[in-house]
Amino acid sequence: MAKKTETRAGVELTNLDAPLFGGADATKRDLIDYLEAAQGSILRELTGRPLSVVRVRPGQQPFMQKNLPDHAPDFIRRTTVWSDAGNREIHYSLCEDLRTLLWFGNQRAVEYHPTLMLPEIADDPSERTEILAGQVTHLVLDIDPPEGSGFDVVIATARLVERALAEAGLSGALKTSGSKGVHVIVPVADVELPDAAAATRALAARAERLDPSIATTAYIKADRGGKVFIDATRSGGASLACAYSPRVRPGATVSFPVAWGDLDGVVPADFTIRSVLPMLDGDPWAASLPSPQQVPGDVLEEGHGIPVARVAAMHEGKRRKRAAERAAAQHAGDRDGTATG
């Protein structure tokens, strides 16, 4: 039997009535309908930013796609970014119009993760773009609950972040992550990448100090002691599921803006690609974002004195491994001594 097709914005769409993914309670058509309805809000989040997507092929596990496939149509803008971490070029897409957005939807791209910086996009897509030379536009504090906890501890920790920001003379906007936690976004101006990373570390540490019984900045999961993790590591060339992005989560949830005053009355599961359609009057996320702010000097100074979490965790992991090896060798020696003594 021939596959049913449909065309929207010049894009041929296929298999629209197929399930989106296991547990989504939605079809591929629901995803396309959502992307089309939310296009204005989503495209404002994606324009000018190299894009990674999470795709879900039938019968396969979700996967992150950074490189634009060779078979992608010519109408999709693209930019080449050099990755120091991977020592390779990445050929990112730039999703800046409905046609491109629907093409991704037809590719079963469910999640949309733009970079956190606005890079200097080359006019010629074959030219490299050095993403670290881009413009830092916001800080991100990603609040994740421990396994088995409710959303109430996330709310309590978000309030700590809100208070830490206020005490520093800053303000941020709040959205659900679309998973189990929330993202606090702080628009900033005139901040270089190292300062942005330092400021995020300092703000997370200040929030933790307000109530260390519930919040932690411990990067190593085993050190968190069942507390809510305030992740301050998202900066620079990193990406984040943007506001309005669907997620590969039960119910096909959406990362959706929440006013601080409404936080106590919501849970992430409230926002799905079906339920949020009546809420898309205007752009609540753009309306909630404060204007870009200057980061105070004392915040920067404190942050530069805090070790980079990934680096510190790497060194700590090596130290613990060596200690475990020494303990194992000592234990083996003790057993040998007992056996031959």
Image: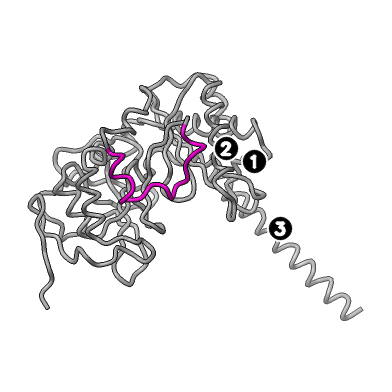
Numbered disc 3: secondary structure:
helix
Numbered disc 2: secondary structure:
helix
Q: Which residue is mark 1?
A: 214
Q: Which residue is mark 2?
A: 157
Range of residues picked out in magenta:
262-280
Numbered disc 1: secondary structure:
loop
Check residue 323 in the rendering and tell me which mark sits there, or answer none: 3
Residue in the image at 27% along x and 62% along y? 27
* Quarter of the image that includes the N terminus: bottom left
Position of 262 compared to 7: left or right? right
* Gap between marks 1 and 2 measured at Cα: 7 Å
- Mark 1 or mark 2, earlier in chain: 2
Position of 24 compared to 94: left or right? right
- Foreground: 209 or 284? 284
Identify residue type, mark 1.
Ile
- Foreground: 223 or 38? 38
In which quadrant of the rendered view does residue 129 lie? top left
Q: Are marks 1 and 2 in contact (CB under 8 Å)?
A: yes
Give yes or no for residue 236 being in the magenta stretch: no
Q: Residue 275, how many percent across, how many down? A: 33, 48
Q: Residue 214, how many percent across, how many down? A: 64, 41
Q: Are marks 2 and 3 in contact (CB under 8 Å)?
A: no
* Gap between marks 2 and 3 measured at Cα: 34 Å
- Foreground: 217 or 40? 40
- Mark 2 or mark 3, earlier in chain: 2
* Gap between marks 1 and 3 measured at Cα: 29 Å
**Can residue 268 be seen by looking at this rendering?**
yes
Check residue 129 in the rendering and tell me which mark sits there, or answer none: none
